[in-house]
Amino acid sequence: MVTERRRSWWGWGWEDEALNADQAANLAAALATRPGFQGRTVGAAPALSDVALPAARVAPPDSLAAFCSSDPYDRAAHTYGKSYRDTVRAFSGDLNAAPSFVAFPRDEQDVIDVLDWCGAEGVPAVPFGGGSSVVGGVELPGAVSVDLSRLDRVVEVDTMSRAARVQAGVFGPALEDQLRPHGYTLRHFPQSFEFSTLGGWLATRSGGHYATNYTHIDDFVESMRVITPRGVVESRRLPGSGAGPSPDRLFLGSEGILGVITEAWMRVQDRPVHRASAGVRFASFSDAVSATRGISQAALFPANCRLLDPGEAMTSAGVTDGSALLVLGFESADHPVDAWIARAVELCADHGGTLPEGVRSASGQGAAGAWRSSFLRAPYGRDAMVAMSVIADTFETACTWSNFEALHAGVVEAVEKVLADVCGGGWVTCRFTHVYPDGPAPYFTFLAPGRRGSELAQWEDIKSAASEVLLDMGGTITHHHAVGRDHRPWYDRQRPDGFAAALRAAKAALDPAAILNPGVLIDP
């Protein structure tokens, strides 16, 4: 008997990729070397059959039943995203936010039919891509979850313009598999790549793995097609236009409140064939920051330019000498990159950087390779820590280079204080995920010992303190994780005066019954 591989309904990724008992025990032993983390035991993952789902508020009508599901697994898997808060609640068996049912549209007409029914009945509809939101972007009790995963094809490829027309429900690996025979890649690889979709990337203005130049999904959009309750909105395919505000910009980052993105023409690229990588170490984190700024302002445009502070370098890349680590990578489909990485390494040397492992012609080796492996497996480790009542989460921002030193110091001081006050200890580390000529995108990770049953209250105190200091120090509440429901209080304060009114007017025009993902970005 062949059992279909399934994604975890409560945690990250595939059920069979979760840390096994030995791996979890090793993680617990590693954590036990830190004060406050001793004696952590791994709780048992919940069985869905033992979890009580709330009664559905509505049932799919006969007109929609052919592509809708009220199956317990489907409802459970569409209850939350994959944030720390989401995972803790699901692990504890709290599925009170479950949707009434899940719609799996097979085509655009199905999307139209679902939105028409929801509008007529006053039932909220939540667009759902891969469900990898870490900001409460897909959570709404009793709603209809509109899962786009059956709209999963590359429909057309324009080789002369180097663009592809892609349905919004395609997951990252399937998209690349369909582009590969044409010699193309979208070259957008967020950490959630395996479990997120093109439509989700567009709706949340996703940031990809590449650290410079083309970093956000915005950079690849040629045109978009969106189904709204008032009709179809489709922008014209153009390389650029100065004709008024951009229609695409209205829907990019709209997080499902204005319409359901069903397809887009995306700018694709030739697949790279030339690669080189290096891991540069710095005794001083400040010097490493200066070197990273120098590279970003030299227009070298490395594919990877991830700076890890000493704590991050130790836990994620196995660097045990107290050094900060700058992970560099260059690639090209057209020309060798030896000169580019040589210049970047030279700039690093000007700021005290050393290259103990040399330059490598392929990625996946040395400290840089260790970091990449850790990066991809990190969400599975997070789930294991949830089972140990360890509070493990991240928050990210962006700021100018001139503001980074003060912001970094202020954030670390504030978060370390709340960790001590709320959890009795813990630590916070920092890395750069993206760098721009005018500033970096710092990404902070914190771990702390939780008290079983009180983890969410502790997390909320930490999250609130971190969010407050980010805004107070002049950063953004999010660089690439979107707003959702978790960031709303701080997004409301960051947003320019008058913009909320303009956004509400757009929503009223496109979604007059206010059925689409209510509570996200604005109140109706």
Image (tube, grey):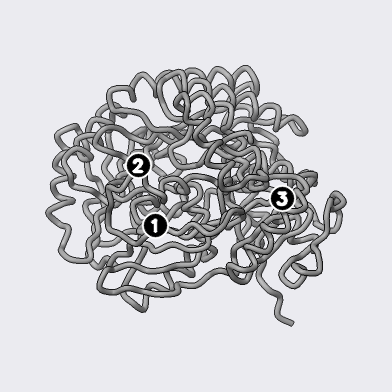
Q: Picture coordinates of residue 425 (x, y %)?
A: 59, 23
Dot 1, crowdedness within 10 Å: few (<14), some or many (≥20)? many
The answer to whether residue 232 is left or right of residue 88 is left
User: Mark 3 or mark 2, which has the lower sequence index?
Assistant: 3
Q: Identify the image quadrant of residue 487.
A: top right
State whether residue 222 appears in this view.
yes
Query: What kind of element bears circle 3?
Result: loop
Image point 29% across, 46% down: which residue? 212
Residue 310 seen in render: no
The residue tagged with tag 1: helix, strand or loop? loop
Residue 360, horizontal then vertical, whole percent:
24, 57
Q: Nearer the viewer, residue 11 or 132?
A: 132
The numbered mark at residue 434 is 2
| Of labels 2 and 1, the one closer to you | 1
Gap in angstroms between the C-alphas marked 2 and 1? 13 Å
Q: How many marks?
A: 3
Image height of 236 relative to 519, above or below: below
In three-dimensional space, the C-alpha distance between marks 1 and 3, rounded to whole angstroms, equals 27 Å
Question: Where residue 79 is drawn, which disc sits there?
Answer: 3
User: Front-most of 309 and 264?
Assistant: 264
Residue matched to label 1: 188
Under mark 3, the amino acid is Thr
Q: Residues within 10 Å of mark 2 (few under 14, many from 20)?
A: many
